Image: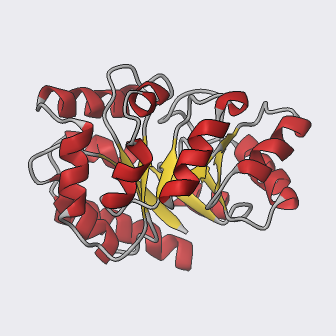
Amino acid sequence: MLVPYLTGGISENWTDYLREYARNGADAIEIGLPFSDPILDGPTIQDASDRALRRGVTVRSVLDEVAAVDVGIPLIAMTYYNLVISRPSFCAELAAAGISGLIVPDVPIDEAAPLAAAAEAAGVELTLLAAPATPTDRLAEIVGRSRGFVYAVSVMGTTGTEFAASGGRLATEVRRLTDRPVLLAFGISTHEHAVAAAESADGVVIGATLMRRILDGESPEQLGAVLAGFRKALDA
Protein backbone atom coordinates (compact mmCIF):
# COMPACT_ATOMS: atom_id res chain seq x y z
CA MET A 1 0.00 0.00 0.00
CA LEU A 2 1.15 3.52 -0.82
CA VAL A 3 -0.37 6.24 1.38
CA PRO A 4 0.64 9.88 0.87
CA TYR A 5 -0.04 12.48 3.56
CA LEU A 6 -1.56 15.89 2.82
CA THR A 7 -2.31 18.74 5.20
CA GLY A 8 -5.92 19.78 4.66
CA GLY A 9 -6.32 23.37 3.51
CA ILE A 10 -2.63 23.91 2.81
CA SER A 11 -3.55 25.90 -0.30
CA GLU A 12 -6.64 27.10 -2.11
CA ASN A 13 -6.34 24.21 -4.56
CA TRP A 14 -5.37 21.58 -2.01
CA THR A 15 -8.00 19.07 -3.11
CA ASP A 16 -6.29 18.95 -6.51
CA TYR A 17 -3.41 17.21 -4.73
CA LEU A 18 -5.89 14.57 -3.55
CA ARG A 19 -6.99 13.98 -7.12
CA GLU A 20 -3.43 13.74 -8.43
CA TYR A 21 -2.40 11.32 -5.70
CA ALA A 22 -5.38 9.10 -6.50
CA ARG A 23 -4.53 9.20 -10.21
CA ASN A 24 -0.89 8.33 -9.62
CA GLY A 25 -1.03 5.21 -7.53
CA ALA A 26 -2.13 6.09 -4.00
CA ASP A 27 -4.05 3.28 -2.31
CA ALA A 28 -5.39 5.67 0.34
CA ILE A 29 -4.64 9.24 1.44
CA GLU A 30 -3.99 10.51 4.95
CA ILE A 31 -5.39 14.02 5.46
CA GLY A 32 -3.99 16.03 8.33
CA LEU A 33 -6.52 18.28 10.06
CA PRO A 34 -4.48 21.36 11.04
CA PHE A 35 -3.84 21.85 14.75
CA SER A 36 -1.96 24.58 16.59
CA ASP A 37 0.26 22.24 18.63
CA PRO A 38 1.03 19.15 16.52
CA ILE A 39 3.45 17.50 18.94
CA LEU A 40 4.19 14.42 16.82
CA ASP A 41 4.92 16.37 13.65
CA GLY A 42 8.33 17.61 12.62
CA PRO A 43 9.14 21.09 11.27
CA THR A 44 7.80 20.53 7.75
CA ILE A 45 4.33 19.36 8.70
CA GLN A 46 4.21 21.88 11.54
CA ASP A 47 4.90 24.58 8.95
CA ALA A 48 2.15 23.18 6.74
CA SER A 49 -0.31 23.15 9.62
CA ASP A 50 0.60 26.72 10.55
CA ARG A 51 0.15 27.87 6.95
CA ALA A 52 -3.27 26.25 6.73
CA LEU A 53 -4.36 27.82 10.02
CA ARG A 54 -3.19 31.24 8.84
CA ARG A 55 -5.46 30.76 5.82
CA GLY A 56 -8.37 30.43 8.23
CA VAL A 57 -8.76 26.70 7.75
CA THR A 58 -10.96 24.85 10.26
CA VAL A 59 -12.03 21.25 10.72
CA ARG A 60 -15.39 22.17 9.22
CA SER A 61 -13.89 23.83 6.15
CA VAL A 62 -11.62 20.87 5.45
CA LEU A 63 -14.47 18.38 5.80
CA ASP A 64 -16.74 20.46 3.58
CA GLU A 65 -14.10 20.46 0.83
CA VAL A 66 -13.43 16.75 1.23
CA ALA A 67 -17.16 16.04 0.93
CA ALA A 68 -17.18 17.79 -2.44
CA VAL A 69 -14.44 15.53 -3.85
CA ASP A 70 -14.70 11.88 -4.89
CA VAL A 71 -11.25 10.44 -5.45
CA GLY A 72 -12.32 6.80 -5.39
CA ILE A 73 -9.89 5.63 -2.69
CA PRO A 74 -10.12 5.61 1.13
CA LEU A 75 -9.42 8.84 3.00
CA ILE A 76 -8.00 8.78 6.52
CA ALA A 77 -8.03 11.78 8.86
CA MET A 78 -5.10 12.44 11.18
CA THR A 79 -5.41 14.95 13.98
CA TYR A 80 -4.91 15.50 17.68
CA TYR A 81 -7.05 14.58 20.66
CA ASN A 82 -7.89 18.16 21.65
CA LEU A 83 -9.61 18.69 18.31
CA VAL A 84 -11.47 15.42 18.62
CA ILE A 85 -12.84 15.92 22.13
CA SER A 86 -13.90 19.48 21.35
CA ARG A 87 -16.44 18.16 18.81
CA PRO A 88 -18.91 15.60 20.24
CA SER A 89 -19.97 14.56 16.74
CA PHE A 90 -16.42 14.41 15.36
CA CYS A 91 -16.51 10.85 14.04
CA ALA A 92 -19.97 11.29 12.55
CA GLU A 93 -18.73 14.43 10.79
CA LEU A 94 -15.82 12.49 9.31
CA ALA A 95 -18.13 9.78 8.01
CA ALA A 96 -20.51 12.35 6.51
CA ALA A 97 -17.57 13.86 4.60
CA GLY A 98 -16.59 10.47 3.17
CA ILE A 99 -13.63 9.82 5.47
CA SER A 100 -13.40 6.20 6.56
CA GLY A 101 -10.40 6.17 8.90
CA LEU A 102 -8.98 8.15 11.81
CA ILE A 103 -5.54 8.41 13.41
CA VAL A 104 -5.15 10.31 16.70
CA PRO A 105 -1.48 9.91 17.64
CA ASP A 106 -1.69 11.48 21.10
CA VAL A 107 -4.69 9.58 22.47
CA PRO A 108 -3.50 7.29 25.30
CA ILE A 109 -4.63 3.74 24.67
CA ASP A 110 -6.01 3.58 28.21
CA GLU A 111 -8.33 6.47 27.32
CA ALA A 112 -9.19 5.40 23.78
CA ALA A 113 -12.32 3.36 24.50
CA PRO A 114 -14.87 6.21 24.21
CA LEU A 115 -13.30 7.42 20.96
CA ALA A 116 -13.16 3.87 19.62
CA ALA A 117 -16.84 3.41 20.41
CA ALA A 118 -17.78 6.69 18.71
CA ALA A 119 -15.69 5.78 15.67
CA GLU A 120 -17.25 2.34 15.40
CA ALA A 121 -20.75 3.78 15.70
CA ALA A 122 -19.98 6.18 12.86
CA GLY A 123 -18.40 3.51 10.66
CA VAL A 124 -14.93 5.05 10.97
CA GLU A 125 -11.90 2.82 11.59
CA LEU A 126 -9.71 4.10 14.45
CA THR A 127 -6.09 3.18 13.76
CA LEU A 128 -3.61 3.07 16.64
CA LEU A 129 0.13 3.70 16.59
CA ALA A 130 2.92 1.30 17.50
CA ALA A 131 6.45 2.56 18.17
CA PRO A 132 9.84 0.81 18.46
CA ALA A 133 9.90 1.31 22.24
CA THR A 134 6.39 -0.06 22.82
CA PRO A 135 6.53 -2.95 25.34
CA THR A 136 5.45 -6.31 23.94
CA ASP A 137 2.32 -6.59 26.11
CA ARG A 138 1.21 -3.08 25.20
CA LEU A 139 1.99 -3.76 21.53
CA ALA A 140 -0.35 -6.74 21.55
CA GLU A 141 -3.08 -4.53 23.05
CA ILE A 142 -2.55 -1.82 20.43
CA VAL A 143 -2.66 -4.35 17.62
CA GLY A 144 -5.79 -5.96 19.01
CA ARG A 145 -7.66 -2.67 19.32
CA SER A 146 -6.53 -1.02 16.09
CA ARG A 147 -8.96 -1.03 13.19
CA GLY A 148 -8.28 -0.83 9.47
CA PHE A 149 -4.53 -1.23 9.79
CA VAL A 150 -1.73 -0.73 12.31
CA TYR A 151 0.38 2.43 11.98
CA ALA A 152 3.97 1.50 12.80
CA VAL A 153 6.33 4.40 13.53
CA SER A 154 9.83 3.73 12.20
CA VAL A 155 11.63 5.88 14.79
CA MET A 156 11.06 7.45 18.18
CA GLY A 157 10.62 11.09 17.29
CA THR A 158 8.61 13.33 15.01
CA THR A 159 7.59 13.08 11.39
CA GLY A 160 10.31 13.92 8.92
CA THR A 161 13.10 12.28 10.91
CA GLU A 162 15.43 9.90 9.10
CA PHE A 163 14.09 6.44 8.32
CA ALA A 164 15.55 3.80 10.63
CA ALA A 165 15.95 0.03 10.38
CA SER A 166 14.17 -0.27 13.75
CA GLY A 167 10.95 0.40 11.88
CA GLY A 168 11.40 -2.74 9.85
CA ARG A 169 11.93 -4.79 12.98
CA LEU A 170 8.80 -3.28 14.52
CA ALA A 171 6.73 -4.00 11.42
CA THR A 172 7.90 -7.61 11.45
CA GLU A 173 6.92 -7.96 15.11
CA VAL A 174 3.51 -6.38 14.54
CA ARG A 175 2.81 -8.63 11.56
CA ARG A 176 3.35 -11.65 13.80
CA LEU A 177 0.53 -10.37 16.00
CA THR A 178 -2.13 -9.48 13.43
CA ASP A 179 -3.57 -10.17 10.01
CA ARG A 180 -4.34 -6.46 9.58
CA PRO A 181 -2.13 -4.51 7.18
CA VAL A 182 0.86 -2.83 8.81
CA LEU A 183 1.89 0.55 7.42
CA LEU A 184 5.31 1.99 8.19
CA ALA A 185 5.64 5.75 8.58
CA PHE A 186 8.07 8.53 9.59
CA GLY A 187 11.23 9.34 7.67
CA ILE A 188 10.37 7.61 4.39
CA SER A 189 11.65 10.20 1.94
CA THR A 190 13.28 8.27 -0.91
CA HIS A 191 12.39 5.40 -3.19
CA GLU A 192 15.06 3.35 -1.43
CA HIS A 193 13.47 4.00 1.96
CA ALA A 194 10.05 2.99 0.63
CA VAL A 195 11.32 -0.23 -0.91
CA ALA A 196 13.23 -1.14 2.26
CA ALA A 197 10.18 -0.44 4.41
CA ALA A 198 7.93 -2.51 2.17
CA GLU A 199 10.15 -5.55 2.71
CA SER A 200 8.77 -5.88 6.23
CA ALA A 201 5.52 -3.87 6.12
CA ASP A 202 2.39 -4.03 3.99
CA GLY A 203 2.73 -0.42 2.95
CA VAL A 204 4.29 2.96 3.57
CA VAL A 205 3.14 6.46 4.47
CA ILE A 206 4.95 9.28 2.65
CA GLY A 207 4.54 12.57 4.47
CA ALA A 208 7.13 15.26 5.08
CA THR A 209 9.00 14.83 1.81
CA LEU A 210 5.81 15.51 -0.16
CA MET A 211 4.70 18.37 2.08
CA ARG A 212 8.09 20.06 1.71
CA ARG A 213 7.56 20.20 -2.03
CA ILE A 214 4.06 21.62 -1.61
CA LEU A 215 5.34 24.28 0.78
CA ASP A 216 7.97 25.15 -1.82
CA GLY A 217 5.24 25.77 -4.38
CA GLU A 218 5.19 22.63 -6.50
CA SER A 219 1.93 22.00 -8.32
CA PRO A 220 -0.53 19.11 -7.89
CA GLU A 221 0.69 17.69 -11.19
CA GLN A 222 4.30 17.80 -10.04
CA LEU A 223 3.42 16.05 -6.79
CA GLY A 224 1.45 13.47 -8.72
CA ALA A 225 4.57 12.71 -10.74
CA VAL A 226 6.62 12.40 -7.55
CA LEU A 227 4.13 9.94 -6.10
CA ALA A 228 4.12 7.99 -9.36
CA GLY A 229 7.86 7.53 -8.87
CA PHE A 230 7.27 5.96 -5.46
CA ARG A 231 4.55 3.75 -6.96
CA LYS A 232 6.89 2.55 -9.69
CA ALA A 233 9.65 1.80 -7.19
CA LEU A 234 7.32 -0.20 -4.95
CA ASP A 235 5.89 -2.15 -7.88
CA ALA A 236 9.27 -2.99 -9.44
Camera-side residue of 36 and 58: 58
Q: Does residue 147 appear to the left or right of 61 in the view shown?
A: right
Q: Residue furthest right?
A: 137
Q: Where 211 sits versus 236, above or below?
A: above
Picture coordinates of residue 177, whole percent (x, y): 86, 57
Residue 207: tell me if it is visible: no
Residue drawn at x 38%, y 27% is 86
| Quadrant hosting residue 56 | top left
| Quadrant hosting residue 87 | top left
Q: How is the image coloured?
A: secondary structure
Camera-side residue of 12 and 90: 90
Picture coordinates of residue 161, whole percent (x, y): 53, 33
Residue drawn at x 36%, y 65% is 227
Residue drawn at x 35%, y 32% is 44
Camera-side residue of 103 and 16: 103
Residue 171: tell me if it is visible: yes
Q: Where 211 sits versus 147, above or below?
A: above
Q: Quarter of the image containing the C terminus? A: bottom right
Q: Does residue 124 appear to the left or right of 209 in the view shown?
A: right
Picture coordinates of residue 165, whole percent (x, y): 72, 45
Q: Residue furthest bottom?
A: 236
Q: Quarter of the image containing the N terminus? A: bottom right
Q: Does residue 60 appear to the left or right of 217 in the view shown?
A: right
Picture coordinates of residue 229, whole percent (x, y): 39, 69
- Count the marks: 0
Q: Does residue 167 appear to the left or right of 102 in the view shown?
A: right
| Quadrant hosting residue 17 | bottom left
